[in-house]
Structures are given as C-alpha cells and as structure tokens.
Amino acid sequence: MTDEHDRQLTALFARAGEELPDNEFVPGVMAGVERQARLTVLMRIAAAAAIVLCAFLLAAPLQDMIIAAMHGLMSPLVAFDHPLPALVLLPVNNVAAPLLLVFIALRALHRRMFL
C-alpha cells in the first residue's frame, strides 16, 4: 500500500465539512443497535410462539393423516389364505414396498446422471 491519498476522495471529505459530535454519535449508534437487537429477539420469540401454537392446533389432524397414510401403505397387494406365507411375505407384500423400490431406482438414476 502507498501513503498517497486519493485526490477525489480527499475533495469529497473536504466538501462534506460537517463534523459529527463525538459525544452524541457513538451513544446514538449504540442505542440503535441495542433497539434492533431487542426487536430481533422479540420477533424470534413471537415466531417461536406462533410455531408452537400452530403445532398444537394441527397436531391431531396431522396425526390422523399420518395414521391414514400408514394404513394405506400397509394394505397387502396379494391376499393369502394361509397365515404362514402372509407372515413371511409381509415386508414385501404391501403398497409401500413398490413405492420404496421406485424411490431407490430414481435415486440411483439421479446419482448416475447428475453426480
């Protein structure tokens, strides 16, 4: 770096000519920063309270939807007369198994094409 000053920048400072009083400037800036920090904390508390309230209001309907989805995904694809084959094939004899296989295939395809 050099010790030379930019002439245009020096001229801009010279034209400004207005000096701020030091004893009022720093406390004013600090008060503004503290006010902004308090406002930020207050907004975060309000957002957290809103999220908790929505969670309480939507907990029961959301739980009902999840249970209905689980029952739908666990419905068997093929009905068996005997309980032994039904129990043995239970992990792959439901709606969720083909969906999982499709998801795994799409993920592998995505990795081969884009990663």
Image (tube, rainbow, N blue to C red):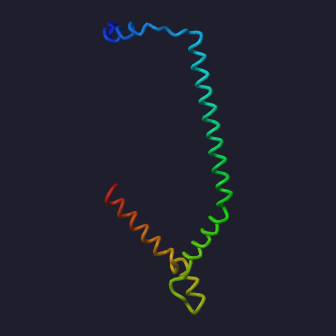
Question: In the visual, does 64 lie left or right of 98?
Answer: right
Q: Residue at x 46, y 72 (%)?
A: 99
Along the viewing direction, whichever of 55 and 18 lies nearer the viewer: 18
**Above-or-below relation of 91 to 108:** below
Question: In the visual, does 100 lie left or right of 1?
Answer: right
Q: Quadrant of the C terminus?
A: bottom left
Question: In the visual, does 108 lie left or right of 88?
Answer: left
Residue 57: x and y in percent read 67, 59
Q: Residue at x 36, y 59 (%)?
A: 111
Residue 21: x and y in percent read 55, 9
Residue 97: x and y in percent read 49, 75
Q: Residue at x 62, y 45 (%)?
A: 47
Q: Residue at x 36, y 11 (%)?
A: 12
The quadrant where residue 68 appears: bottom right
**Above-or-below relation of 13 to 40:** above
Q: How many marks?
A: 0
**Above-or-below relation of 13 to 73:** above
Q: Quadrant of the N terminus?
A: top left
Along the viewing direction, whichever of 105 and 63 lies nearer the viewer: 63
Name the outermost residue toward the bottom. Answer: 81
